[in-house]
Image (cartoon, rainbow, N blue to C red):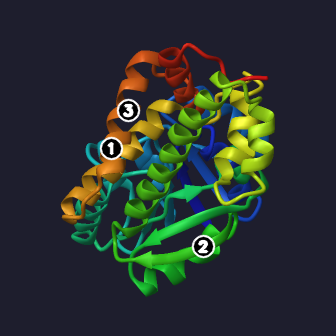
Amino acid sequence: MQIAFLGLGAIGTPMARHVAAHHALTVWNRTAAKAESFAAAFGATLAASPAAAARGAPVVITCLPTSREVESLLDGPDGLLAGMADGTLLIDCTSGDPASSRRIAARLAERGIAFLDAPVSGGVSGAEAGALTVMCGGDDATFARARPVLEAFGKKIVLVGPIGAGHALKAVNNALLAVHIWSAAEGLAALTKAGVKPSAALEVINASSGRSNTSENLVPQRVVTRAFPRTFKLALLEKDVAIAADFIREQRVPSTVIQQVAELFRLARHELGEDADHVEAAKLIEQWSDVIIAD
């Protein structure tokens, strides 16, 4: 099957590589050099525009930083709508927002184009291994059509609800990640100041009820070691937490913790910069506490 893939970032590149191993692939990226090198390395066809990428492809996959970028690619002579034919399926793997998903889906439906929001979780390592979790929003028929494509890079693929539900769940999932990072940093900063070695604290926490992926992996591998590899930008996590906060507010559900964490990550993004890794948010607590979470 001919598939178009738009967005060759840190997650998108390994996803596209897995798709290329099973399907004929056309790629487009805003930074053309990335698409050129990918096409040369993996035998994909290089497209000069989103329209050119989508032309003749029954399935189009987008994997961009925000829903705003996806919407920006729709219109104009070089936009996706100029290339997608009636009956095309657009799978949006962007960590987007539910309202935008519904808006995009409505526009596509007017052209006879199906839509599935299908954000992913698992990070760069999950994408490299082809073992991402894919949370999908759409109808049963569209999901059934998309699933064989998603299996190229997804290990757990779940239809979670109607259009927009995938993006809502992704935002809430990442909000929980942010809560874990912030609360772990607060607790460990206090323990470190009290003379407890972070490694000893984590050894106990990770054998107890307070453990999480953050305490088991992110904190020991990044905060304690001071490595902070930049695999997922703090700016993108802040965006996701803000989406979750808005979504929960729209559902009229009290969300004191997530609303507060959204504000804290907005501050962390401002203080630490656009290129900081998401776990570097812990540095803000260290600054405020005058302590470094390390042995």
In the rendered view, tell whether residue 91 sits above or below residue 277.
Answer: below
- The residue labelled by disc 3 is 264
The one nearer the camera, 184 or 190, is 190
x%, y% of residue 81? 31, 55
Residue drawn at the location 49% of the way across and 78% of the way down:
159
Q: Which mark is residue 157?
A: 2
Instruction: Determine the secondary structure under disc 3.
Output: helix
Residue drawn at the location 46% of the way across and 37% of the way down:
236
Q: Is residue 169 visible?
A: yes
Question: Residue flagged by tag 2: what amino acid is it?
Answer: Ile
In the rendered view, tell whether residue 289 sits above or below residue 20.
Answer: above
Left-right relation of 281 to 79: right
In the rendered view, tell whether residue 178 sits above or below residue 229.
Answer: below
Considering only order in the chain, which callout, 3 or 1, is on the residue closer to the N terminus? Answer: 1
Cα distance, mark 3 to mark 2?
32 Å
Residue drawn at the location 55% of the way across and 52% of the way down:
5
Considering only order in the chain, which callout, 1 or 2, is on the residue closer to the N terminus? Answer: 2
The one nearer the camera, 102 or 187, is 187
Cβ atoms under marks 1 and 3 closer than 8 Å = no
x%, y% of residue 249? 22, 57
Considering only order in the chain, which callout, 2 or 3, is on the residue closer to the N terminus? Answer: 2
Q: Nearer the viewer, mark 2 or mark 1?
A: 1
Q: Can residue 125 be seen in this view?
A: no
Q: Which of marks 1 and 3 is in front?
A: 3
Q: Residue 242 carries which label?
A: 1
